[in-house]
Structures are given as structure tokens and as C-alpha cells.
Amino acid sequence: MKKTFFLASAVILFAACNNSSEKNSAATAEKVEVAGTDGTAYSIDSSALVTWTGSKPTGKHSGTFTLSEGTLFVKDNNLTGGSFLINIASLTNQDLAGDAENKGKLEGHLKSPDFFDVAKYPTAKFEITSVEPSISDSSKKTGATHLIKGNLTLKDSTKNVSFPATITIDANTVSATADFSIDRTQWGMNYKGPNNPQDWFISKEVGIKLAITAHKK
């Protein structure tokens, strides 16, 4: 009876953890053909960051990836396309900064074949397939200006994701920010396999925040 109660409680907590980020979940579809680039090229700054957050019933961890390279294209003051490489090997944890031992263990674990398999897949790639003005009520509440769709290649899988973003453009600079989540299992990221009970207690939803600035070449 105690075991049943514990399992039921864990499932409830796990469900709550998963549901907490559903409203920000990026829509995921099959890979889409990338259109040709059109417009003026803007180089993405090396200071651009991708922030990640992973969670489980007992807590969460967050950290960053840097970008290896990237270019955005602008025509008639509108973002028309672009792509960038995410340096997965740069994965860094932030919340354990004061605990070097556990910080190192977590980073090593995430970089191992259990998750990102950095030795085999040191980078990920995002290629924009479309950019549309955002008109949904939820986007207006968050201040998002556009809906971005693009192919995300992570490990050996490519899926098309769409998410709201805030984009600002001036004569020399493009800035883009976004806050959403993706289902890691869509890219085959399962701890010890998709049907392993240890994977069930890690939220499928991984929070992603983009903070990108690019300057005219």
C-alpha cells in the first residue's frame, strides 16, 4: 500500500512538472525544406546564448550553450531567414556554480551518450524556414512580435519547430529573444532508453531561451 501511494504521488508530481511548461511548448513537425536566403546578411555576435532548463519532481537545473557561428538575413526591415550552429560541447551548468564537484558531474552526465553525446555530436543546427508576424493573444501578452519556424537538428534527428519571438531591427542590428520549450524525446534524447523508468521522472519538456544579436556585415 505504501509503495502504491508513493508511486501515485510521484506520478502526480511528475505530471505537474511536465504540465508547468506546456503553454510555452514549441509546436513540432517534420523537417521542412529551407528556402534560399534573401536580403542583407547580419553576423550573429559571439555573445549570443542559448539558455536551457531541465526539470524533475525534485528540482531543476539550468545552464547555457554558446553559438559557434550564424547569420541572419533582413530585407525591407523584415527578418527573412538565417541559421546558426549551437556549440553543444560548450554546455555549462549555472545553478551549481558554488558546488564544483556536482557541477562537473552534471555537465559530464549531460554531455555523455545518456543525453547529448557531445563526442559524437558536438554541435546542433537551427535553420529558419519562415518568419511571420505574430497575432495570437498569447503572443501579444508576452510581447512576441513574430512566429519563427525552423529546422532544429539535434544529434542525428531534424524536426521543424515553431515558437513566438520578439524581433527588433534597425539599420545595423538585429536582436531576437524567445522563451519556449521542446520535447527532448522528439530528438531521441531518452535516459537509458525511452521505456526506462528512470527516464519517466525527468520532464520531457526542456526550457529554451534565445538571446541573439547580429550586426550587418
Image (tube, rainbow, N blue to C red):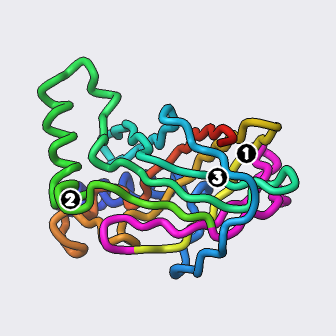
Residue at left offset 16%, top offset 47%: 109
Q: Kindly identify which numbered label has been placed on residue 166.
A: 1
Compared with 30, 109 (above or below) is: above
Q: In the shown orientation, is residue 2 left or right of residue 138?
A: left
Residue 168's image quarter?
top right
Q: Quadrant of the C terminus?
A: top right
User: Mark 3 highlights which residue?
Assistant: 72
Of labels 3 and 1, earlier in sequence is: 3
Residue 29's image quarter?
bottom right
Mark 1 nearby-residue class (10 Å; few <14, some 14–19, many ≥20)? some
Start-end of magenta stretch: 129-157
Of labels 2 and 3, earlier in sequence is: 3
The three-letter code of the residue at mark 2 reads Asp
User: Mark 2 highlights which residue?
Assistant: 117
State the SS at label 3. strand
Compared with 105, 100 (above or below) is: above
Residue found at the far front of this picture: 217
Of labels 1 and 2, earlier in sequence is: 2
The three-letter code of the residue at mark 1 reads Thr
Mark 3 vs mark 1: give the one in front.
Answer: 3
Residue 204 is covered by the magenta coloring: no
